[in-house]
Amino acid sequence: MCAEQITISPIDGSVYVKRDYADKATIDSTLDRARAAQKQWKTSPLAERKALCNKAVDVFVAKKDEIAEEITWQMGRPIRSAAGEVAGLEERARTMIELADEGLATIKLPDKPGFERWIQREPLGVVFVIAPWNYPYLTAINAVMPAILAGNSVILKHSAQTPLCAERFAEAFQAAGLPDGVFQYLHLTHEDTAAIIKEEWIDYVAFTGSVSGGSMVENAAAGRFIGVGLELGGKDPAYVRADADIPHAVDVAMDGAFFNSGQSCCGIERIYVHDLVYDEYLQQAIAWVKHLKLGRSDEQETTLGPVVRASAADFVRKQTQEAIDQGAIAHITTDVFPLDKPGTPYLAPQLLSNVDHSMRLMTEESFGPVVGIQKVSSDEEAIALMNDSDYGLTAAIFTSDIDKGAQLGQQLETGTFFINRCDYLDPGLAWTGVKHSGRGCSLSVLGYEPLTRPKSFHIKTVL
């Protein structure tokens, strides 16, 4: 009998989903089907691939209400915002479909007498996608859609917290008429996940998750000479300059910090505010946080749901208390959020001032509803603090001087730079990180490069 994968809902601690882990026979047959299907799929016209992928998106969007409810119960996002993930998936998928012609286009070299020369993009083979629970569809689609469009087959391993997401992908592709074996999923243990990465028929691994998980993937792939895309953690900063629109900077950065209960790799986890506007910003930010409503994710009035599990909440509680013990000032009292109880996933939002980089809260990923606000006296100080991190996924500056903001952005060690917004992926732009935030690239026309290999044709026409 296979071992069982159990999904506990953070809403009420109930068992929401049970699935058997794939056994060796299932894993082997899945790999065989993926390899066989890809050989045929890569010969199909790109126009056919695009049409099938558009149909799959249509099927998916038609079930947005059911999918939103499943997201809510699996990982705890409030039902009022869960459907937004379906809209985000559609935007990213349609964008990658539109960009496929350009991303996969043959490069014709200038004429050279007696020769024809071109470079074409060829699919890699079988792509193994490992997706997390926090944005279960958005993170997966970044690799799944361009991989299939490029002529690869895909095997998806989704988080044990969100197994229904993998099944929903399969339903949509099957209903759209995608050939059998081009997209498949497996419910896997960590050990079997690592073993599959080592399999000779896996040609690329796209992983989204923790730094420790990324290290596991790299170790498993060592010596295989295959591509590995790693989208890892973040400790993303924002800087509010003295000339910023303060109400806008408060609303956008606070939403970036607390949306999805702070469980976003590109969420805002530390804010630096110029001392000329610091007091004004802090008071407005405190008022903003106090208007959040912590509650059950299946209730429409809830704006802040539980974090994914009690252990995650207790980690944030410990990190926050440690900062307070070191001198940080907490501005939110738990009596405003009575559902907050130690040992449960229900965690009150917290905003801390009088923080600095001696505190783990300002340097170590929190992945929860807490943010530190630090006073700075200059642009130079803000940039130095923003770069003082092991991570580099996104960074934001709030300012009315766009030219100056862009100039400061050139100095930031980050994959994506924002002015006057944050916590958003534009699928037309490359999604990438530096330092411990990972390596590789997804989305945009550049997102096709890691999922294909260049093949050069050099033909002598005159003998």
Image: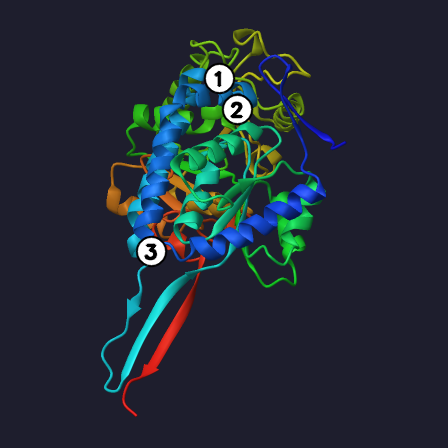
Q: Nearer the viewer, mark 3 or mark 2?
A: 3
Tag 2: amino acid: Pro
55 left or right of 316 in image: left
Marks 3 and 2, the one that precedes in the sequence = 3
Q: Are marks 2 and 1 in contact (CB under 8 Å)?
A: yes
Where residue 410 appears, as percent x and y from the top left, is 36, 52
Marks 2 and 1, the one that precedes in the sequence = 1
Residue at x-position 42% and y-position 46%: 383
Instruction: Work out whether residue 449 or residue 100 is closer to the camera in this orientation and state it.
Output: 100
Q: Which mark is residue 45?
A: none
Q: Mark 3 highlights which residue?
A: 103
Instruction: Work out whether residue 39 or residue 213 is closer to the camera in this orientation and state it.
Output: 39
Marks 3 and 1, the one that precedes in the sequence = 3
Residue at x-position 43% and y-position 9%: 301
In 3D space, how far apart are the residues under numbered discs 3 and 1 (Cα atoms)?
39 Å
Task: Give the quarter of the figure containing the C terminus.
Answer: bottom left
Q: Which mark is residue 304?
A: 1
Q: Mark 2 highlights which residue?
A: 369
Where residue 22 appears, as percent x and y from the top left, is 67, 37
444 left or right of 315 in image: left
Residue at x-position 37% and y-position 44%: 417
